[in-house]
Image (tube, rainbow, N blue to C red):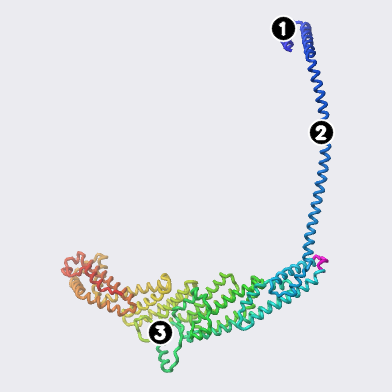
């Protein structure tokens, strides 16, 4: 091959004119040579080639046998695959048949179980007492069979007719026994002195009895329900009517009437004279009209939810109570019984929402109407506003208790009571306002600078209402108290105008303002409108009184200081340059008389004011004001206009004066 390429290369390298035939011969000769060489090579390797041929032939034979075997295997696998598919189909078919049979067996088993009425059930329903646990268990089973029989009858299953008669007979027997048991328990409520809560608790243990009747014999269920409603309605009405009547027998013997108003003349002395002349026996208990005292304790959690009053025990102990205590006891008994009854009705009779409320009202409605009627009669003739207001707040708290317990049964009753009490309270308050507005000071007896009994009544009453109203604020109450305060302030001013001197007028005003403020601060908050109002009035009148008592002994000096200070502000102090004689008299007069004047003033103040603490405060204020005026006197005389006055040397040293004045401050 290399020789051939070499020849071709040579051919390619030849130039024009070379003889192609010559080259052709050379090529052919070269090919023959190569062919001969190849033949020799083949001959040389002939044995190897023959051996390779034999090996290839043997391999072909082996491969042919393997092909036959594989073809057999393929045929066998094809038949196995078809058999597996057939087995799978048969397995699926058998599984479906098994499930169908199991489902049918389950239904048939349940059907057979439900259709079969065991002998134990029959004997238990017929013979066992309803209070036995076994009876209750068999009653549940019977109820299930009754429901199942109803279901089968809707499907028109023929098998249910086989047991229908037995089930019906058992149902009638169970209904009869349950009816007799429940009615017997209800009738036991009617026995005198019976604690009906015990049979109620027994019924709750067998609440399924009523559920069974309601599902299977509604006429009997309605009979039992109606019998219960009628029985409990009469029991509650009888109990609360008797209890309310006996409670009124332990009320205070003397109660407020239409003449017990703030602005009405105090008739205590007249009452004493009448008792002396007519020998009227003294009343053992009398409720206070305007003073809260210990009555507010009725709103404390301890007393609010304390045990109810037992009237015959109170009568034996000769105890008497205000109306709000009786009201609390009566309504706490109502709350306690009402909540328990509502829960029983909801549980035993399986009612809720409006149905429960309707059932509750059918039982308690007559009792609640009796309460409202008797309360309306009493309230229409009641003039004890504190008692009415306490009753209102008792209802507020009882309503909160029922709300917390999630018992809506008495909500409408609470609202009805409040609709009775609020207008009456507001009417009494307005009557007191009018009584003070129409008061004639000239008809109230001898004038006295001490606190007036009308203002004391107001202070006690207002502090009582404000302290009670703090827990459940009411704007209408606050507005009426504001009107009452205005009328009392006007009354105090009218009374003060009856005094001939301004000094006595101020003493009267300060005594009354101080008394009212003291009483209010005992109960009302310090930031209440009433307290703030009287504090401002007391401060203003006290300052005016201090000026009034300083005027007689030190009026000349005070007038000079005020006049000089006014001229100093205008820069016209020289206008007093020729007042040397006046100044000399003022300096010497003060130095010679101030101790006696201060002593006399202190004694006079302490005699004039009923409250020692207030009198002490006024004396301290007066002495402080005196020092301020005398300091101003020093300041004026230190001006260039008066520095040449010889009398300046006779001025008392201000520090010395303060030390001496401090000795005259009383300590109480």
Residue 523: image x %, image y %?
43, 74
Label 2 environment density (alpha carbons within 10 Å; few <14, some 14–19, many ≥20):
few
User: Residue 362 appears at what percent x and percent y?
Assistant: 64, 78
Tell me, yes or no, whether the two marked residues, 2 and 1, touch with CB atoms within 8 Å: no
Residue sitting at x 81%, y 20%: 53
SS under mark 1: loop
Q: Please name whichever residue, 209 or 256, is drawn nearer the observer in this view of the structure.
A: 209
Q: CA distance from mark 2 to mark 3?
A: 139 Å
Q: Residue furthest left?
A: 646
N-term-proximal mark, 2 vs 3: 2
**Position of residue 122 in the picture relative to residue 362 (left or right):** right
10 Å crowding of disc 1: few (<14), some (14-19), many (20+): few
**Of label 2 and label 1, which has the lower sequence position?**
1
Q: Nearer the viewer, mark 3 or mark 1?
A: 1
Mark 2 and mark 1: span between their CA atoms? 67 Å
Pointer 3 residue: 440
Where residue 577 appears, x then y in whole percent? 19, 68
Tag shown at residue 15: 1
Magenta residues (range): 154-161
The alpha-carbon separation of the residues under discs 3 and 1 comes to 167 Å
The front one of 128 and 432 is: 128
The answer to whether one can see residue 476 in this image is no
Instruction: Determine the image quadrant of residue 65.
Output: top right
- Tally of numbered tags: 3
- Magenta stretch prevailing secondary structure: helix
Which SS class for mark 2? helix
Q: Which residue is mark 2?
A: 70
Q: Which mark is residue 401?
A: none
């Amino acid at each position: 091959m290399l020789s051939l390429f070499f020849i071709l290369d040579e051919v390619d390298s030849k130039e024009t004119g070379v003889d192609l035939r010559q080259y052709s011969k050379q090529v052919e000769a070269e090919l023959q040579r190569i062919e001969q060489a190849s033949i020799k090579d083949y001959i040389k390797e002939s044995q190897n080639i023959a051996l390779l041929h034999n090996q290839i032939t043997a391999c072909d034979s082996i491969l042919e046998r393997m092909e036959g075997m594989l073809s057999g295997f393929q045929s066998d696998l094809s038949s196995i695959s078809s058999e597996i598919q057939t087995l799978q189909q048969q397995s699926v078919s058998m599984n479906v048949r098994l499930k169908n049979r199991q489902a049918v067996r389950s239904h048939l088993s349940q059907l057979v179980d439900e259709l079969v009425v065991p002998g134990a059930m029959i004997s238990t329903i017929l013979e066992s007492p309803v209070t036995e646990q076994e009876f209750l268990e068999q009653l549940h089973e019977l109820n299930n069979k009754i429901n199942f029989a109803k279901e089968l009858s809707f499907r028109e299953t023929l098998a249910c007719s086989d047991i229908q008669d037995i089930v019906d007979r058992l149902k009638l027997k169970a209904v009869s026994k349950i009816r007799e048991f429940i009615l017997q328990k209800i009738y036991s409520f009617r026995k005198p002195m019976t604690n009906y809560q015990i049979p109620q608790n027994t019924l709750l243990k067998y609440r399924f009895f009523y559920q069974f009747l309601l599902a299977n014999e509604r006429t009997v269920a309605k009979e039992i329900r109606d019998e219960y409603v009628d029985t409990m309605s009469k029991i509650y009405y009888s109990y609360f009517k008797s209890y309310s009547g006996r409670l009124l027998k332990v009320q205070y013997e003397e109660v407020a009437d239409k003449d017990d108003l703030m602005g009405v003349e105090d008739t205590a002395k007249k009452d004493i004279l009448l008792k002396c002349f007519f020998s009227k026996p003294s009343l053992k208990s009398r409720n206070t009209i305007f003073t809260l005292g210990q009555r507010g304790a009725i709103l404390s959690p301890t007393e609010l939810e304390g045990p109810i009053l037992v009237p015959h025990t109170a009568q034996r102990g000769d105890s008497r109570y205000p109306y709000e205590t009786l009201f609390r006891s009566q309504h706490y008994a109502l709350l306690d019984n009402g909540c328990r009854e509502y829960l029983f009705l909801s549980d035993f009779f399986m009612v809720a929402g409006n149905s429960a409320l309707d059932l509750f009202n059918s039982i308690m409605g007559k009792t609640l109407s009796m309460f409202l009627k008797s309360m309306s009669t009493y309230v229409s003739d009641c003039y004890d506003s504190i008692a009415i207001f306490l009753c209102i707040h008792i209802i507020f708290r009882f309503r909160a208790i029922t709300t917390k317990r999630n018992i809506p049964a008495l909500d409408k009753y609470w609202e009805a009571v409040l609709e009775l009490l609020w207008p009456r309270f507001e009417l009494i308050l307005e009557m007191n306002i009018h009584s003070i507005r129409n008061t004639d000071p000239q008809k109230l007896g001898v004038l006295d600078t001490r606190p007036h009994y009308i203002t004391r009544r107001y202070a006690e009453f207002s502090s009582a209402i404000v302290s009670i109203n703090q827990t459940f604020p009411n704007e209408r109450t606050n507005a009426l108290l504001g009107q009452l305060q205005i009328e009392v302030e006007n009354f105090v001013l009218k009374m003060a105008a009856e005094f001939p001197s301004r000094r006595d007028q101020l003493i009267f005003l300060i005594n009354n303002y101080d008394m009212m403020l003291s009483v209010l601060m005992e109960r009302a908050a310090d930031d209440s409108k009433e307290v703030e109002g009287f504090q401002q009035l007391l401060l203003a009148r006290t300052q005016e009184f201090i000026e009034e008592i300083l005027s007689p002994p030190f009026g000349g000096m005070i007038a000079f200081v005020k006049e000089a200070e006014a001229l100093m502000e205008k820069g016209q102090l020289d206008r007093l340059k020729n007042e040397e004689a006046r100044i000399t008299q003022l300096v010497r007069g003060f130095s010679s008389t101030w101790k006696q004047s201060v002593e006399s003033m202190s004694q006079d103040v302490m005699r004039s004011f009923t409250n020692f603490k207030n009198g002490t405060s006024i004396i301290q204020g007066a002495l402080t004001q005196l020092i301020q005026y005398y300091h101003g006197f020093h300041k004026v005389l230190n001006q260039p206009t008066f520095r040449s006055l010889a009398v300046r040397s006779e001025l008392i040293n201000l520090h010395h004066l303060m030390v001496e004045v401090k000795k005259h401050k009383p300590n109480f």
